Image: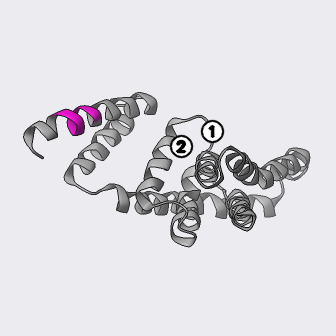
Amino acid sequence: MIELLIQACISFLKIGAFSFGGGYAVVAFIQREVVEGHGWISPEDFVNVVAIAEMTPGPIAVNSSTFVGYNLFGVLGGILCSASTLAIPFILALIVAIYFSKFKDNVYLKNVLSGIRPAVIGLIAASCLSVGKISFETWHSVIFFAVALFMVWKCKINPIITLITCGVLGAVLYGLVFPMAGI
């Protein structure tokens, strides 16, 4: 059991170390580690973790590590996996806070950041595709996706309101309408 906990902490150290661009950019990496690489959670549970992590405060990587750690080892596992995810970014943030003002005008640093920014968009797109493969089970799923996209992108509705709206619609449709219609 200790060996598995150490393995989980090392995985979340890696996830934390490569979480450039925020949570969405690292979703595919988390999926590769915890679903495909180690099989700690199922693909369906992973999509639920991402949804719950999106609705709860904090970064997706930390919320995911808390969920997986708790599922595998209880409260202590949730705490240790979360701390593992945060350790390297915390150290990097301290280093950046100390030295960034000295190097912010450095042409090499600007060039590196110019390469990282578009790569982050690619990572986010890859995450969307990997979660989409699991999430788009039926045409109903595609409609929920379209409604949420329309609400946030075109109508500029707050994402929290969008999530609540889609959650309520899901409860009504999947809990009441579809069973009564035999769907």
Please tell me in which quadrant of the rendered image residue 11 appears. bottom right
Residue drawn 30% across the image and 56% down it: 136
CA–CA distance in space, label 1 to label 2: 8 Å
Residue drawn 38% across the image and 39% down it: 153
Which span of residues is magenta-colored? 171-176
Amino acid, disc 2: Ala
Residues packed near mark 2 inside 10 Å, few (<14), some (14 to 19) or many (20 plus): many
Between residues 36 and 60, which one lies in front from this camera angle? 36
Which quadrant is the N terminus positioned in? bottom right
Magenta span main SS: helix
Q: Residue furthest bottom?
A: 37
Q: Residue furthest left?
A: 181
- Looking at marks 1 and 2 on the same chain, the residue that comes earlier in the sequence is marked by 2
Task: Determine if the magenta segment contains residue 156.
Answer: no
Asked if the residues shown at circle 1 and circle 2 are in contact, with their CB atoms under 8 angstroms apart, the answer is yes
Q: Position of residue 17 (x, y in %)?
A: 73, 60
Q: Which mark is residue 58?
A: 1
Q: Position of residue 60 (x, y in %)?
A: 58, 47
Query: Where is mark 2, residue-wise?
Result: 53
